[in-house]
Image (tube, rainbow, N blue to C red):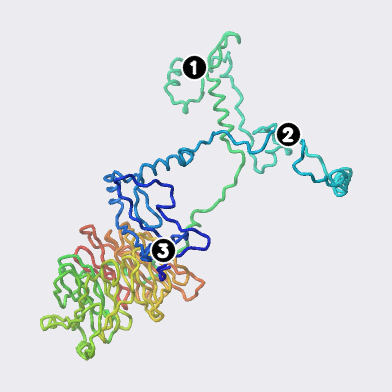
C-alpha cells in the first residue's frame, strides 16, 4: 500500500467516506464545512497503516499523514478541562483527525442509544397495509392434485414403529422415572453406623457430649454446694472464663417454684456452635524434627582459609573511597576517592607510595591483569585515563611505555566514539600516558583477561553506554546499536569470548565472535548494583540495592540458583576470589560478608554456598557504608573501601 499512490478498493466493496457515508445533514448557513479529506483506501483494516507515518491517500493520490500525537496525559487533561467542545469531539479512524459533532449528529447518536429509529419522521405504529385479502374464496390458489402419499400409510414409518414396540416388549426401552424433588437431609452427628453417610469416613470424630448435671445443678442442692455471700461476690468479680461454675447454685422448696432458666437460648446457641465448629475428621500430623529441615552445612572451621580479622588500615584519603584494585602480583594496591586523588599503596606495610591528583571524583579503577603490562585504567568524570604507576620492576614499566609509544597513527583518520589524546608533559610526569575523552560521565572501567582490550560504561540513556577499547591500536568501538535500559556494570568472561552487560533488572550475555545474544538472566531484584564472574566462568553473582545477592548457574537456569538476603541495606560491591572458593559482598550497613562458594566439576552436583564470616570495621557515613570489595590475587585476603575514607585489609 505504501508504494502505490492510487486508490485501492477490494472487489465488491464500496469505499467508506467519513462525511458522505453517514446520514448527517449539511452544515448550517454561515458555518464552514469541514475540510474534504477523503481517504480512498477502501474497506480494508486500518491496522495495516499502523507502522507508517500516513494513514491513506486522498482523491489526488497524495498521502494523508497522521496528525502528530505528542500530547501526554497532563496535556490531554488540560485540554479536557479547557476545551468546551471536548465532550463532543471524536476521532475519525480513516483520517485520524478530531471532528466535533454537530447538534443534529448528537441528536442522532442519542436516539440510537435509546433504541429509537434514526429517522425522526418514521412511525413504527402506523396501520399495517393488508396486502392479502382476509375473505375466503371458493377457488383454490393452485389446482394441483393431491399426492398419493397423503392418503396411503407409509411403510417406512410402519417399520420404525414395529422396532420400537419390539424394544419396549423386550425391556430395552424403559420409561423415564419422575425426578424426586424432595431434599435429602442427614444427621450431621449420626451414630457410628457403618451404613450411614458419616460412618464411611475414616478417622471420624464423634460429636462432643454434654457433661452430665451434678449436685450443684439440682433445684434442691445439698448445703455444701451453696455459695456463701463472700464466695458469691468473688464469683461475680471473676471473668466468665475463669469461673468454675457457669451458674449460681440456688435452692427452691419445690419443683413448681423453679423459674425459667434465663440463659437457655444462650446455652443452646453455644451448643450449636460446638457441634458446628468441632472437627468431624481426625487428621494425622506429620511428626518432623525441626532440625531435619535445616540443611546440613559444613562447619566454617572446616572451610578455612578465609579472612577473619582486620590486619591493616590504609589511611590518607579525605573523602569517600569509591574504587579499589590490586596488581596481578598482589604487591600493590590502588584506590580512588572523591577527594580527586589516586593513591598507590604497598599491601604488606600500608605505606602510600604515590599520590596522583586527577582533579575530580574517581568512580572506578582497574589494574591491568596481564603481569607483563604495568597499566591502570581510571574513570574520572567524562574521561578515562591510562596510568603507568612506575612501581616495581623498572624493566616492566619501561617496556610498558615502549609498547604505548610504538603505536603509529593510521594514514586515514577513523571515526571513533571517543577521542584518544596523548598526555602532556605535566600529565606524563604524574604517570598519565593516554586520555580517552568520552561525551558522558564514565562510571566503570574493566579489563579483559589478556590485558589488551578493556571496556568503559557511560552514564546516560540511549545508545553508546558501553564502549570497548583496544590499547595497542588505540581503537574504540560501540558494540551495541542500542542498550536495553540503563547499563549498571559490565564484565568480560574469563575463558570464553562472552561479554556480560547488567542492566537494572537483568544480565545479558553476548557472544562477541558471533555478535549475538546468548542468554538473558532474570535477577528477581529491583536494581542491580554490581556483578562478578566466577573464575570458572559458569557462575555469576549480582548484588542489588534491595539488599539481595543473586547466584546464577549459567548451565542450570536463567533464574537465580540462590537468592541470599544476609545484609540489612543496599549492596554496593561483590567479588570472587581467583584461586579459593570464596566470594564477598559489601553493603551500606558497614559490613562485609565472606561466603564459601564451592563449584564442582560434576554437573549433577549443585554449588555449595555457606556464609562464613561477617567482617566489621567501617563506620557508615552519609548513609553509605562499604563501597568496594576486592580479593587478593593469591592470598585469602580481602580489601574493602568505605565511606569513612579508609581502606581495610582482612586476613
Circles 2 and 1 in contact, beta carbons < 8 Å: no
Work out how far the residue at label 3 is from the one at label 2, CA to CA, in angstroms: 64 Å
Q: Position of residue 64 (x, y in %)?
A: 36, 62
Q: Closer to the N terminus: mark 1 or mark 3?
A: 3
Label 1 crowd bin: few (<14), some (14–19), many (20+), radius 10 Å = some
Q: Which residue is mark 3?
A: 49
Front label number (3 vs 2): 2
Work out how far the residue at label 1 is from the one at label 3, CA to CA, in angstroms: 95 Å
Q: Which residue is mark 1?
A: 227
What secondary structure is found at the residue carrying circle 1? loop
Circles 1 and 3 in contact, beta carbons < 8 Å: no
Q: Which residue is mark 2?
A: 136
Work out how far the residue at label 2 is from the one at label 1, CA to CA, in angstroms: 104 Å
In percent of the image, x 60 and y 9: which residue is there? 256
Q: Pick the residue in front: 332 or 575.
A: 575
228 sits to left or right of 256? left
266 sits to left or right of 144? left
Taking the image as drawn, is residue 409 in sight? Answer: yes
Front label number (1 vs 3): 3
Amino acid at each position: 500500500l505504501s508504494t502505490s499512490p492510487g486508490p485501492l478498493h477490494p472487489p465488491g466493496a464500496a469505499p467508506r467516506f467519513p462525511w458522505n457515508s453517514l446520514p448527517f445533514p449539511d452544515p448550517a448557513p454561515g458555518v464552514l464545512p469541514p475540510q474534504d479529506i477523503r481517504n480512498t483506501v477502501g474497506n480494508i483494516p486500518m491496522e495495516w497503516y499502523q507502522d507508517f507515518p500516513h494513514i491513506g491517500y486522498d482523491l489526488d493520490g497524495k498521502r494523508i499523514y497522521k496528525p502528530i500525537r505528542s500530547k501526554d496525559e497532563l496535556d490531554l487533561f488540560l485540554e479536557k478541562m479547557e476545551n468546551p467542545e471536548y465532550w463532543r469531539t471524536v476521532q475519525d479512524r480513516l483520517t485520524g483527525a478530531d471532528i466535533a459533532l454537530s447538534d443534529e449528529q448528537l441528536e442522532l447518536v442519542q436516539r440510537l442509544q435509546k433504541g429509537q429509529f434514526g429517522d425522526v419522521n418514521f412511525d413504527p405504529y402506523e396501520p399495517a397495509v393488508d396486502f392479502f385479502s382476509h375473505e375466503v374464496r371458493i377457488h383454490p390458489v393452485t389446482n394441483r392434485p393431491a399426492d398419493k402419499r397423503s392418503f396411503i400409510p407409509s411403510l417406512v414409518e410402519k417399520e420404525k414403529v414395529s422396532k420400537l414396540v419390539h424394544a419396549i416388549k423386550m425391556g430395552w426401552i424403559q420409561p423415564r422415572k419422575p425426578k424426586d424433588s424432595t431434599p435429602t437431609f442427614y444427621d450431621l452427628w449420626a451414630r457410628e453406623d457403618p451404613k450411614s453417610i458419616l460412618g464411611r469416613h475414616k478417622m471420624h470424630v464423634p460429636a462432643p457430649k454434654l457433661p452430665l448435671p451434678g449436685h450443684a445443678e439440682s433445684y434442691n442442692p445439698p448445703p455444701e454446694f451453696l455459695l456463701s455471700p463472700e464466695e458469691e461476690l468473688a464469683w461475680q468479680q471473676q471473668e466468665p472464663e475463669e469461673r468454675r461454675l457457669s451458674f449460681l447454685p440456688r435452692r427452691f422448696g419445690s419443683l413448681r417454684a423453679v423459674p425459667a432458666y434465663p440463659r437457655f437460648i444462650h446455652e443452646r446457641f453455644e451448643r450449636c456452635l460446638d457441634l458446628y465448629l468441632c472437627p468431624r475428621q481426625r487428621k494425622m500430623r506429620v511428626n518432623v524434627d525441626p532440625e531435619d529441615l535445616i540443611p546440613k552445612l559444613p562447619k566454617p572451621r572446616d572451610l578455612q582459609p578465609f579472612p577473619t580479622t582486620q590486619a591493616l588500615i590504609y589511611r590518607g584519603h579525605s573523602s569517600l573511597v569509591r574504587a579499589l584494585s590490586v596488581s596481578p602480583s598482589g604487591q600493590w594496591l590502588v584506590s580512588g576517592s572523591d577527594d580527586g586523588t589516586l593513591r598507590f599503596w604497598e599491601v604488606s606495610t600500608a605505606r602510600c607510595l604515590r599520590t596522583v591528583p586527577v582533579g575530580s571524583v574517581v568512580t572506578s579503577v582497574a589494574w591491568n591483569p596481564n603481569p607483563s603490562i604495568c597499566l591502570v585504567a581510571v574513570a574520572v568524570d567524562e574521561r578515562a585515563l591510562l596510568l603507568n604507576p612506575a612501581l616495581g620492576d623498572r624493566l616492566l614499566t619501561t617496556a610498558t611505555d615502549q609498547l604505548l609509544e610504538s603505536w603509529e597513527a593510521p594514514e586515514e583518520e577513523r571515526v571513533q566514539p571517543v577521542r584518544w589524546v596523548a598526555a602532556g608533559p605535566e600529565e606524563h610526569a604524574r604517570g598519565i600516558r593516554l586520555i580517552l575523552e568520552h561525551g558522558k560521565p564514565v562510571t566503570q572501567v574493566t579489563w579483559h583477561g589478556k590485558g589488551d582490550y578493556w571496556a568503559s560504561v557511560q552514564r546516560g540513556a540511549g545508545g553508546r553506554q558501553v564502549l570497548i577499547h583496544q590499547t595497542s591500536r588505540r581503537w574504540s568501538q560501540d558494540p551495541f546499536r542500542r542498550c536495553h535500559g540503563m547499563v549498571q556494570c559490565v564484565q568480560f568472561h574469563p575463558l570464553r569470548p562472552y561479554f556480560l552487560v547488567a542492566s537494572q533488572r537483568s544480565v545479558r550475555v553476548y557472544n562477541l565472535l558471533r555478535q549475538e545474544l546468548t542468554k538473558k538472566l532474570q535477577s528477581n531484584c529491583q536494581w542491580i548494583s554490581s556483578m562478578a564472574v566466577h573464575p570458572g566462568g559458569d557462575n555469576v553473582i549480582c548484588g542489588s540495592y534491595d539488599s539481595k545477592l543473586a547466584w546464577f548457574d549459567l548451565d542450570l537456569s536463567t533464574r537465580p540458583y540462590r537468592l541470599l538476603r544476609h545484609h540489612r541495606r543496599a549492596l554496593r560491591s561483590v567479588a570472587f576470589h581467583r584461586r579459593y572458593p570464596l566470594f564477598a559482598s559489601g553493603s551500606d550497613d558497614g559490613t562485609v560478608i565472606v561466603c564459601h562458594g564451592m563449584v564442582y566439576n560434576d554437573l549433577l552436583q549443585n554449588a555449595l554456598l555457606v556464609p562464613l564470616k561477617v567482617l566489621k570495621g567501617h563506620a557508615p557515613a552519609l548513609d553509605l557504608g562499604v563501597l568496594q570489595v576486592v580479593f587478593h590475587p593469591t592470598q585469602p585476603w580481602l580489601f574493602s573501601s568505605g565511606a569513612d575514607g579508609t581502606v581495610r585489609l582482612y586476613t
